[in-house]
Amino acid sequence: AHANTVEEEVEEPFDPDIELPEDRPLKPLKLAIIGQPNAGKSTLVNALLGEERMLTGPEAGITRDAIANDWEWGGREIKLWDTAGIRRKGKVKEKLEKLSVTDALRAVKFAEVVVVLVDASFSIEKQDLTLCDLVAREGRALVLALSKWDLVEDKNAAMRKVEEIMEDILPNVRGLPIVTLSAKQGRGSDKLLKAVLE
């Protein structure tokens, strides 16, 4: 009879219309970064945090777990998850990769804003669109970030193509912010965080 005496703490959803008293700051914004392996997620996290917090390298799959990092930007506290890359189910053979996918999906459920990071030096793929759709269906704010933008030769054509694909295949995320990045060169991270906070 007394098994359920400890009540679980349920977090109230954030309502932007409620004015908080000045001595009661906003809770940290929960942000997750997801994407396919080697899209540059850990490089981006290092650029955002301003330090080499995450292991990076040319091999896909260095990051195996979702790792939480706390920091502040523009006076707002942010709790950031860098997640392991999500591959298509057919390619998820190893147990570790299956755990990584579960971890990333859990991060989406826990986050308020999700950045889907896409390698812009390749064409946007079906898997990237699936991730965007998942975030939208979970009711999270979505920002699409195009990494390795410095490697794209015709930037106008590349941006038009991405916008057309998003409009045709995912009309339910119409108007979503698209930010270009060069994480290695440290360009675009302020632009990305501005879009995240908006």
Image (tube, grey):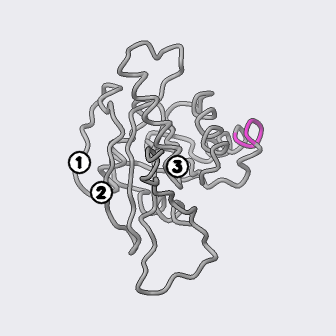
- Identify the amino acid type marked 2: Leu
- State the CA–CA distance, disc 3 to disc 2: 17 Å
- Counting labels gives 3
The prevailing secondary structure element of the residues shown in magenta is helix
What numbered label is drawn on residue 69?
A: none
Report the span colored magenta.
166-170
Does 96 appear in magenta? no
Image coords of residue 153 (percent x, y): 51, 40
Decide which of 136, 163 is in the foreground and name it: 136
Q: Secondary structure at mark 3?
A: strand
Image coords of residue 172 (percent x, y): 75, 45
Q: Secondary structure at mark 2?
A: helix
Q: Residues within 10 Å of mark 2 (few under 14, many from 20)?
A: some
Cβ atoms at labels 1 and 3 below 8 Å apart: no
Q: Which residue is label 2 attached to?
A: 49
- State the CA–CA distance, disc 1 to disc 3: 20 Å
Q: Which residue is label 1 attached to?
A: 53
Does 167 appear in magenta? yes
Who's the residue at 61% across and 69% down the image?
A: 15
Decide which of 98, 75 is in the foreground and name it: 98
- State the CA–CA distance, disc 2 to disc 1: 8 Å
Q: Residues within 10 Å of mark 1 (few under 14, many from 20)?
A: few
Image coords of residue 32 (percent x, y): 45, 48
Who's the residue at 40% across and 85% down the image?
A: 23
